[in-house]
Amino acid sequence: MKNNLLIICDSDKNYCHKLDSYIRDNLSIPFSIYGITDITRLSEFTSSGKNILLLISQSLFEKKIPFGFKHILVLKEKENVLEEKESYYGCEDSDIRFIDKYQRSENITDSILSMCLDIPEIVVKGNGKDQSNSLTITGFYTPRYSKDKTAEVMDYAGKMAAKEKILYINTDSFCTSKILRNPEYNETIADLIYFAECSDDKFGIYLERIVKHDKELDFVPVCHIPSQGRMIKSSEYAKLFRKIAETEKYDTIVFDISDGMPDLFDALNLCDELYVIHDNDYISQKRVDLLINDLQRDEDFDMNKLHRVTGGGRIGA
């Protein structure tokens, strides 16, 4: 079986439909999804293959333990009833985990992704080849200090996201955006960089688990600790971009580059298009001129991809 199989088994038909719709809209892992309310139908799927994940409500699970499934997520409806370490007769070799049923669909999909990481046979979208030519890196940089730059670029990226698949990545280790830096995020750009180096065929699952959403815009959270972010080199971003391209999930990465990068000009060279943001005052113009003079001396940089734009919320106008 080429695609992965996800079965949602719950007596509430509306709940099955709602969760089914959310998973289809938000996960790019190729699941064939079945929502069923009759637990007796589960026997139809036990011989379908090894890359099957069963999501089942606690009431149905307790009513009839589903034998023949190796990967089961139980949706808890009551507290202090099920024990995760409890052994179930006939399911001793199964991976059975428990999550709360009544929570945000996004949290449930995070649990699905975490379980997928432990299913060896799971199929991840992408052919594993270098697809970097199909992924555009659109960079934004300013040699002037601007507290509004992040908001400007995110606003631009959000507008782009209405037309194509966009991923926003910010390199500012001192970023103060409450959207990008949130203590509730368990994983950040540092974790994604690590998985790009070590995860091989499961990188697409880690990517989906770490990426967060602000309306239509997908973004990677910045590091909780600034010194962590400052240690990430442009070569690591280059490897990350190649791995993201292999997933075929995004058309464009909006790469918000900060002065704090240890190898700034190498980062600028990663961009297919580079937008330099400036104000109309003398100091800002002078700083941009100095940057352009440096880039002109860089034999590896193509000046045709550089564009000067005025800041103040008018990017892309």
Image: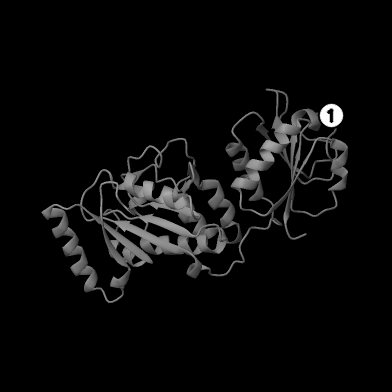
In the picture, measured across the screen, residue 5 lies left or right of residue 257, that is right
Residue at image position (16%, 58%) is 285
Could you say where residue 47 lies in the image, as x and y percent from the top left?
A: 85, 52
Residue shown at 49%/45% (left/top)? 216
Describe the colour scheme in one phrase.
one colour
Q: Which residue is mark 1?
A: 63
Quadrant containing the N terminus in the rendered view: bottom right
- Residue sitting farthest toward the left: 282
Depicted 253 relative to depicted 85: above or below? below
Identify residue type, mark 1: Lys
Residue 231 screen position, x and y as percent: 35, 54
| Dot 1 alpha-carbon crowd within 10 angstroms: few under 14, some 14 to 19, many 20 or more | few
At mark 1, the secondary structure is helix
Q: How many marks?
A: 1
Instruction: Name the spot of residue 52 as percent of width and height, x first.
Output: 75, 49
Q: Does residue 114 appear in the picture of this structure?
A: yes
Look at 29% across and 63% down and name the residue there. Answer: 307
